[in-house]
Amino acid sequence: MPDLTSMAVIIPSLNEAQSLRELLPMLQQMYPGQVLVCDNGSTDDTRQIVEQAGATWVYEPQRGYGAACYAGMRALADDMTVVVFLDADLSDDPTLLPDLCAPILDDTYDFVVGTRVPHLRQPGSMTFPQRFANAMFPVIIKLGWRYAYSDLGPFRAIRRTSLDVINMQDRAYGWTIEMQIRAVELGLRICELPVSYRKRPRGPSKISGTIRGVLLAAYWITRTCGGLWLTRHRRIKKHELHT
C-alpha cells in the first residue's frame, strides 16, 4: 500500500452519523494525513462521532455539496499533496482509496475519477435519474470539450496543486462536473479507475432519493455545464498566457 500520509480525505456530510461511525475507522487504518468531515448542517451526533474517531470536524452551515467540499479545501494542511473526495454514505468502497491515490503519488496522473462501471455496481445502487445523468452529461462534455468521460463519480483523487489551479467555483451540485471539465481544459493527466458501488445501507439518498433532490441536481449540473461552455475560450486563453 502506498504511503498516504500526504493525502487528505474530504467527506461532505449531512446527517450521516451512523455511516460515519463505520467509515471513519476504516479510513484511519490507512493512516491518511488528514480526514476532514465537512458537516453541512447536521442535526445528529456527527460532530461527536467525528471527533471520537480522531478525524477533523469542519462545519459549513451553507447548504450545498460544493459548499461542504470547499470548506474542506479551506481546512487542508499545507503539506497535503493529494486530495480525495469521498461521500459519507458508504456507497463507495473506502478500501479502494490507495488505488485512486497511487497514480498521483507515482506522478503518472494528476486526476483520478472512480468510475462506477455497471458490472461492479450492486443491483439497485444507482437510481434511474442517476443512470440517466451519467449517460447524458458525459456526452455533453464530449460534445463541448472533446473528452470522453464515462461517469461523474464523486469518489475521486486529485493532485493538490492541480486542484488549486482549477479554482473551484460551484457551491452546489455542479461541483463534480466542474472539476472534470476544468481538468480537461487545463490539460491534466486524467485517469478513470473502475470502482465498485453499492446501495447506501441506511436510508435513501438526499439527492437521488427525492424528486426535489433530483431536480435540483439536474438544474445545477446543467447550469454549470452551460456557464463553463459559454466562458471556455476566455479561460483557455488565460491559461495559455500563463503557461
Image (spheres, helix red, strand yellow):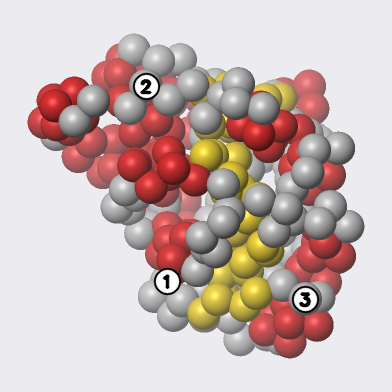
Q: Nearer the viewer, residue 36 or 106?
A: 106
Give the residue at x 74% y 47%.
4
Give the residue at x 65% y 34%.
105
Sequence-first disc among 1 and 3: 3
Query: Which residue is the site of mark 3?
Result: 54
Please state which amino acid type lies under the numbered disc 2: Gly
Name the image quarter holding residue 24: bottom right
Query: Which residue is the site of mark 1?
Result: 63
Label 3: how many Cα within 10 Å (few below 14, some 14–19, many 20+)? some
Label 1: how many Cα within 10 Å (few below 14, some 14–19, many 20+)? some
Badge number at residue 71: none
Percent from the top left, x then y, of residue 130? 56, 39
Badge number at residue 187: 2
Q: What SS does tag 3 mark?
A: loop
Q: Nearer the viewer, residue 64 or 162?
A: 162
| Res. 33 in view | yes
Q: Quarter holding the C terminus?
A: top left
Please state which amino acid type lies under the numbered disc 1: Arg
Which numbered disc, 1 or 3, marks the residue closer to the eye? 3
Give the residue at x 63% y 55%.
8
Please state which amino acid type lies under the numbered disc 3: Gly
